[in-house]
Image (cartoon, rainbow, N blue to C red):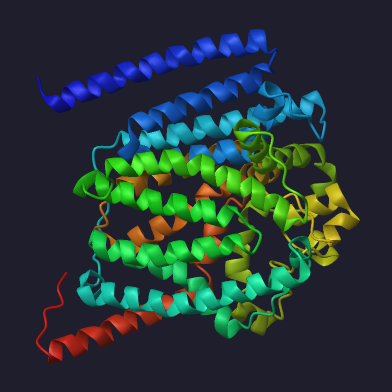
Amino acid sequence: MDVSVVKKNNQTIVSILCAVTSIVLLCVWTTIYHINMLFSLLLVVWFFLLIHSVIHLHESITELCFLLAFFVFLLGRQVCYIFFNVDEVYAFLDVTNDRTYLCMLVSLVAFAIGSAIRGNKKKTRLFKKQFKTPTIINSNSYALACKYMFLICYVFQIIVILLQIRYVRSVGYLASYTNEDGGAGIPSLLYYPSSFASVSLCLFLATKPTKKKAMKILLLYEIYAVLTVFTGQRYPFIGINMFIMSYMFIRDRREKGWIKPSYYIIALLAVPTLMILSTTFDAIRTGRTFTSNGFVQTIIKFLDQQGGSINTIRRTIYNAKELQDLRFVSLSSTRTALLENGISRALFNTKIYAGAGNTIEAAFKGHSLANRLSYIAYGEEYLAGKGTGSSYIAELYHDFSIVGIICGSFLYGYWLKCVNLMQFKKRIIGGIGIAMLYYIYLAPRGGFDAFVGYLFRIYTIVFYVIVIILAFFIRSIRNRKGISVNG
């Protein structure tokens, strides 16, 4: 019998066993711990999807990362309350909790359906219709242009993050949220090219560089990820590392050699270590004294700290009346990209509130669910920098109810599977696809369409045009010297 058939049959058997185990756990958890049935079902569905992703790791690494983020940012705190007797800080009505669990359950199911539908397709192209790609995009000149653009923008990115670190150290972590752009006073001349660094990196990675070339560039990006921690934020570091891991698995799926067995051991050791360091850092950034009651309690504290986004969904449901005047918060990044760009501001004198910090104007005149909820929840403390954050589930529910969650989550599942299976034959689409990963991974505690605001703003498009021009320039020089430019 064909080895691949045997492997597939074994994976099917394991999946069935996991499904049966999940059902048994549902019954046991509900009986012993007297858990809310909806939450228990939610936990079991998440567990089954997680095991399925691990079994089909190379084909499902993007789904695995999303599920891990889903647990850390949405499920973790409630798990601590139920299974580890952690004191619940905020209490909500049972009807609010039930609706929250239902929204999360619907999201996971729709996400799984979207992923499954895309995974069952025989062809691994993102689109059936074939578009003719310009020759310059398929040349080595384009790859070099993307690489050079990243290196140039990376210098600006490092300068900007160092300025942010200096500002946070001078005023404090919470106070850094009270002013526009973190209050660091970063001029546009630095900010715009620094923001394009991540995009140009993804454009370069989509040209399928060798492992040696890619790892050198990714190492630079990892240095930036470490520096972001010193601004007081932890989720950029998490998102960047999940992005790097995903890219390596996507390349390893067809080419092999990108993932070594030792990497799995390193990952297993690194995860709990980073959780402990993250918990320690949370105490330091807010001026508290860190105390540890042991390894397990520190992990529990980490999940409790990071899992607060579930309360964002609860608050959105509970405070529905106070949020009635907000419209299309799930498309706020799209609005910013299309209507609040430099051209719109110049032509129509458009007033923008995105990135305005924790101010009254941002809460009541802007289009951010996070700002409005933060003010409702914390009042004056919001003006001092305290906030609730957002969540794609909360935003979709506020705008379009359960139907919005189904459509949005289905789109996430479908797109992540597309990226997981892509062969990078279409370099532009490939670059955009892997650039979206970071923002989708952080969507459980961020905006639904956050990737639009960063990938399709005016200055991003301008910089991409510069990449094309640079590629033509490099090609013309190489042609004059008689060097081959075909990839």
User: How far across and down, in percent of the image, does residue 144 sit?
Assistant: 27, 76
Left or right side of 343 for 256: left
Q: Is residue 317 visible?
A: yes
Quarter that holds the C terminus = bottom left
**Residue, x 11% and y 83% (percent of image)?**
483
Left or right side of 349 for 447: left
Q: Quadrant of residue 269?
A: top left
Query: Camera-side residue: 282 or 479?
Result: 282
Query: Camera-side residue: 408 or 385?
Result: 385
**Residue, x 79% and y 50% (percent of image)?**
373
Q: Quadrant of residue 209?
A: bottom left
Q: Quadrant of residue 217?
A: bottom left
Q: Is residue 125 visible?
A: no
**Residue, x 61% and y 31% (percent of image)?**
296
Looking at this rendering, what residue extends furthest in the right direction?
380
Quarter that holds the N terminus = top left
**Residue, x 85% and y 64% (percent of image)?**
360
Q: How many marks?
A: 0
User: How far across and down, in percent of the image, does residue 259 sit?
Assistant: 28, 46
- Image height check: is 72 above or below 125? above
User: How far across and down, in percent of the image, does residue 185 sit?
Assistant: 69, 80
Left or right side of 314 for 344: left
- Image height check: is 467 above or below 100? below
Query: Camera-side residue: 318 or 283?
Result: 283
Query: Camera-side residue: 191 or 114?
Result: 191
Looking at this rendering, what residue extends furthest in the bottom direction?
480
- Image height check: is 177 above or below 262? below
Left or right side of 75 for 23: left
User: How far across and down, in percent of the image, does residue 111 sit?
Assistant: 49, 36
